[in-house]
Amino acid sequence: MNETMNNILTRRSIRKYTPEMPKKEDLEQIIRAGLYAASGKGGQSSIIVAVTDRALRDRLMEMNRKIGGWAEGFDPFYGAPAVLLVLAKKNTPFTVADGSLSMGNMMLAAHALGLGSCWINRAKEAFDTEEGKALLRELGIEGEYEGVGHCIVGYPDGPAPEPKPRAEGRVFWVE
């Protein structure tokens, strides 16, 4: 099996991380993979906000926790020290697809580099709020963007989960 297929078949969502920050060079490679994702009509509508600042990471985490309705103290980012926030231009027909492809590429790249990752939802809800829009302005991000996902990244704290069996009846051949 080639390396790409092996990474696709062995990547898992990681939900427990060590506090150690991944190397910047590794995060740069992961981001590059996200930027090279396919995009509708080559429009490249997605952007990535690379968050390694602990205070901003915790601010994003707290926004996510409140939207998810979890008790104070719960970390929906599972202790991951880095968050690669993916947003895409609003009002294009490819917003969600473009951002989703960036997320997928980054999770595969993280796995290929020996890092763990997980797609954390609620980015759309977070950046539809006034707080989320204000945060983007604080970061100097101009324009209308929709949150697609938080790609949390870090070193796994423990083994990856076993894969779930693949559901049957999901392929229909027309020959």
Image (cartoon, rainbow, N blue to C red):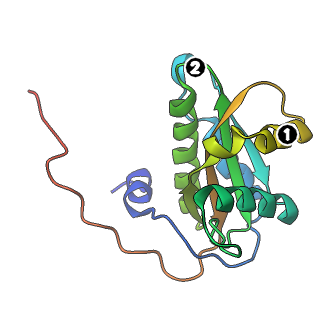
Task: Please name whichever residue, 79 or 74, is drawn nearer the observer in this view of the structure.
Answer: 74
Q: Are marks 2 and 1 in contact (CB under 8 Å)?
A: no
Task: Please name whichever residue, 75 or 16, is drawn nearer the observer in this view of the structure.
Answer: 75
Which badge, 2 or 1, comes first in the chain's sequence?
A: 2
Q: Nearer the viewer, mark 2 or mark 1?
A: 1
Question: Which amino acid, by three-letter code, is at mark 2?
Answer: Gly
Residue 96 in the image: state x and y as whole percent: 53, 33
Q: Is residue 52 left or right of residue 140?
A: left
Graded by Cα atoms within 10 Å as few (under 14), some (14 to 19) or many (20 or more), the crowding at tag 2 reads few
Q: Is residue 156 above or below residue 1?
A: below
Q: Is residue 41 above or below residue 68?
A: above
> Of helix, strand and loop, which one carries label 2?
helix
Query: Can residue 168 be seen from the camera position used here?
Result: yes
Q: Is residue 3 above or below residue 146?
A: below
Q: Residue at x 49, y 64 (%)?
A: 13
> Of helix, strand and loop, which one carries label 1?
helix
> Which residue is identified by label 1?
134
Image quadrant assignment for residue 56: bottom right
Question: Which amino acid, by three-letter code, is at mark 1?
Answer: Ala
Q: Is residue 66 left or right of residue 96?
A: right
Query: Can residue 33 be seen from the camera position used here?
Result: no
Q: How many marks?
A: 2
Residue 147 in the image: state x and y as whole percent: 65, 39
State the residue lying farthest toward the bottom.
158
Q: Is residue 117 left or right of residue 57?
A: left
> Which residue is identified by label 2?
42
Label 2 and label 1: CA atoms lie apart by 29 Å
Image quadrant assignment for residue 47: top right
